[in-house]
């Protein structure tokens, strides 16, 4: 027979209860039915045939069983033994044994067989009601605890499964990043950075590209690497690839590489820079990456600067800490976020913020590079605001094989063909 789940009681203990009475004497059955119904028990069923006890318990799902101890053909102890073997595992069915046998041995046998209480015949009506109420309330408490435990077990199972899936997914993602690190899939493209006073390319930004599945933006590769504990390794691999290309450019052209604050503080980066033409290297720290403790980053940057490395704050005007972040880092270069330069020709607020940053950069002896320039109107406006340099699709797209000056193949042979005539930049009054 399939396991049966008892329905939890609700409302008043007696009013919501179902009691099953089994006694071979119909008079006792009738008496108990009347006593319990008068006391407010919701449903009372009586049987005189003990052979029907197990099937009745499974069908009726009573909250309490009142069972005669001594009956012909099948006594109460045998019924308790059958119930113990038949009821669903963990099911609690309280049993009150009914008996006229006052011997302690009879009582002990009944309790040992699984009974929770007993009543001596003839019955005292008040005692019957009190004992029935006590056991039904115990049943309610048991059900409540069991439901709570079931909920906790279910939550634990769900959390365990989520954690298992997360571990599996993390392992897959880590293997994916490890594959990118081990294989020949990481390449660099270079976007020109143009001096707006001369229209000459003065530097390039090295940008990582991944020639493997999944095809997705590079920032998603680096974010995934950081999430699986390989962020510094992947950033250093990109820096290594960028520095390997420095010699293809003229000595007047600097190469800018992107690193997070944690990678900037890594000893491996210092060792990489020390082996290369550090005077032509610019490290870009994005303003979107939070720095919780500046001291180790500042100490590392000071060491890199002693090698001639310059530092740039990327996405200026769009990050979490604004000028306070810049003041702590004191970068040699500020890069205006493309969200600020995009449409700057038609937005007075953007122009006002850019002007403030230009003046601020002059005060701390930093150079301004505007990112994301796509129209000649944006470029003209940036020139009028005394922005020194710019990069963007208008000036050249990222190119895996630019010329020795860093000029992209997407640029015209003369940058002035797509820009306004350069004009001398006015000297700012000190």
Image (cartoon, helix red, strand yellow):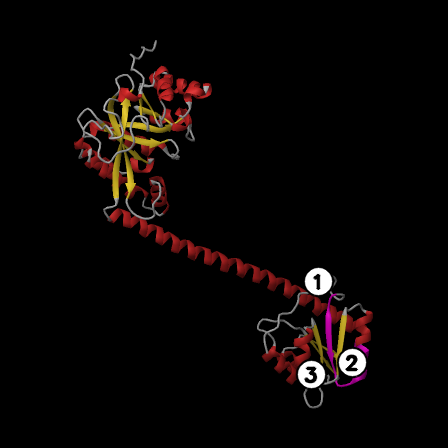
Comparing labels 1 and 2, the label whose residue is closer to the camera: 1
Q: Which residue is mark 1?
A: 10
Task: Work out whether residue 430 or residue 35 is closer to the camera in this orientation and state it.
Answer: 430
Crowdedness near tag 1: few (<14), some (14–19) or many (≥20) residues, C-alpha within 10 Å: few
> Does the magenta-highlighted stretch encompass residue 30?
yes
The region drawn magenta spans: 16-32
In the image, residue 102 sits, relative to residue 393, either above or below, namely below
Residue at 42% x, 57% y is 164
Residue 358 picture quarter: top left
Task: Work out whether residue 269 or residue 316 is closer to the camera in this orientation and state it.
Answer: 316
Q: In the image, 348: left or right of 142?
A: left
Query: Which mark, by number, is residue 264?
Result: none
Q: Which residue is mark 3?
A: 52
Q: CA distance from mark 3 to mark 1?
A: 27 Å
Q: In the image, 354: left or right of 272?
A: right
Give the percent coordinates (x, y) of residue 53: 68, 81
Q: CA distance from mark 3 to mark 2?
A: 15 Å
Give the percent coordinates (x, y) of residue 420: 32, 17
Q: Which residue is mark 2?
A: 29
Helix, strand or loop at disc 1?
Answer: loop
Comparing labels 3 and 2, the label whose residue is closer to the camera: 3
Crowdedness near tag 3: few (<14), some (14–19) or many (≥20) residues, C-alpha within 10 Å: few
Q: Earlier in the sequence, mark 3 or mark 1?
A: 1
Residue at 53% x, 60% y is 154
């Amino acid at each position: 027979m399939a396991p049966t789940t008892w329905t939890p009681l609700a409302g008043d203990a007696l009013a919501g209860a179902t009691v099953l009475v089994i006694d071979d004497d119909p008079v006792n059955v009738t008496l108990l039915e009347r006593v319990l119904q008068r006391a407010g028990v919701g449903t009372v069923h009586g049987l005189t045939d003990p052979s029907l006890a197990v099937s009745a318990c499974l069908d009726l799902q009573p909250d309490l069983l009142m069972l005669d101890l001594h009956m012909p053909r099948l006594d109460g102890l045998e019924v308790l033994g059958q119930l113990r073997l038949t009821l669903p595992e963990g099911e609690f069915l309280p049993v009150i044994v009914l008996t006229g046998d006052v011997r302690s041995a009879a009582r002990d046998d009944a309790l040992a067989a699984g009974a929770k209480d007993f009543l001596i015949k003839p019955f005292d009506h008040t005692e019957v009601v009190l004992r029935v109420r006590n056991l039904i309330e115990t049943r309610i408490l048991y059900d409540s605890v069991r439901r709570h435990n079931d909920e906790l077990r279910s939550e634990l199972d769900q959390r365990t499964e989520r954690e298992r899936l997360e571990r599996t997914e993390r392992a897959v993602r880590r293997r994916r990043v490890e594959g990118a690190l081990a294989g020949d899939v990481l390449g660099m493209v270079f976007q020109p950075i143009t001096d707006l006073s001369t229209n000459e390319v003065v530097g390039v930004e090295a940008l990582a590209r991944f020639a493997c599945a999944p095809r997705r933006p590079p920032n998603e590769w680096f974010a995934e690497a950081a999430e699986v504990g390989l962020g510094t390794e992947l950033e250093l691999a990109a820096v290594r690839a960028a520095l390997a290309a420095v010699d293809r450019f003229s000595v007047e052209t600097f190469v800018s590489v992107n690193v997070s604050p944690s990678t900037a503080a890594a000893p491996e980066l210092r060792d990489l820079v020390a082996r290369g033409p550090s005077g032509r290297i610019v490290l870009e720290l994005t303003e979107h990456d939070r720095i919780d403790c500046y001291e180790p980053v500042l100490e590392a940057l000071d060491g890199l600067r002693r090698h001639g490395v310059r530092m740039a704050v990327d996405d200026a005007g769009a990050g979490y800490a604004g000028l306070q972040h810049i003041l702590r880092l004191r970068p040699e270069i500020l890069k205006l976020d493309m969200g600020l330069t995009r449409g700057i020709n038609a937005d007075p607020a953007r122009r006002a913020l850019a002007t403030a940053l230009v003046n601020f950069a002059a005060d701390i002896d930093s150079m301004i590079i505007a990112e994301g320039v796509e129209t000649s109107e944006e470029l003209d406006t940036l020139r009028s605001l005394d922005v020194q340099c710019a990069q963007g699709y208008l000036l050249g797209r990222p190119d895996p094989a630019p010329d020795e000056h860093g000029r992209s193949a997407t640029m015209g042979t003369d940058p002035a063909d797509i820009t306004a005539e350069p004009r001398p930049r006015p000297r700012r009054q000190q």
